Image: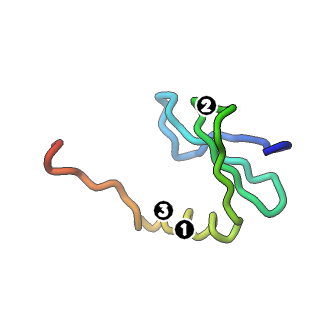
Amino acid sequence: MTGAAWRKSSRSNNGGEYVEVADNLPGVIGLRDSKDPAGPTLAFDPSAWATFVAGVKAGHWAAETNPATS
């Protein structure tokens, strides 16, 4: 993603495991793993990204506790 300005997600933890988002490119939102900045990236349509973020904020994909590991 040439020209992408990557920033750490505000919801990432401080342990070094986080994703980076690039929202400065026209018509695309980029996502990558901070531990592998030269690795693959995901590209999202801005409206799809907005729908996903709204769903996360609403708790639609909240982490569930697995009884087998609790």
**Rendered position, 49 above or below 63:** below
Q: Nearer the viewer, residue 65 or 14?
A: 65
The image quadrant where one finds the C terminus is: top left
What residue would you read off at disc 3?
56
What residue would you read off at disc 1?
54
Disc number placed over residue 36 in the picture, else none = 2
Comes first in the chain, label 3 or label 2: 2
**Rendered position, 59 above or below 12:** below
Q: Secondary structure at mark 3?
A: helix
Q: Amino acid at mark 2?
A: Asp
Q: Is residue 63 left or right of residue 50?
A: left
Q: Amino acid at mark 3?
A: Val
Comes first in the chain, label 2 or label 1: 2
Disc 1, disc 3: CB below 8 Å?
Answer: yes
Q: Is residue 54 left or right of residue 22?
A: left
Residue 49 on image: x %, y %: 63, 64
Q: Give the quarter of the image for residue 36.
A: top right
Q: Give the quarter of the image for residue 6.
A: top right
The image quadrant where one finds the N terminus is: top right
Nearer the camera: disc 2 or disc 1: 2
Q: Amino acid at mark 1?
A: Ala
Q: Secondary structure at mark 1?
A: helix
Q: Residues within 10 Å of mark 1 (few under 14, many from 20)?
A: few
Measure the alpha-carbon separation of dots 2 and 1. Answer: 26 Å
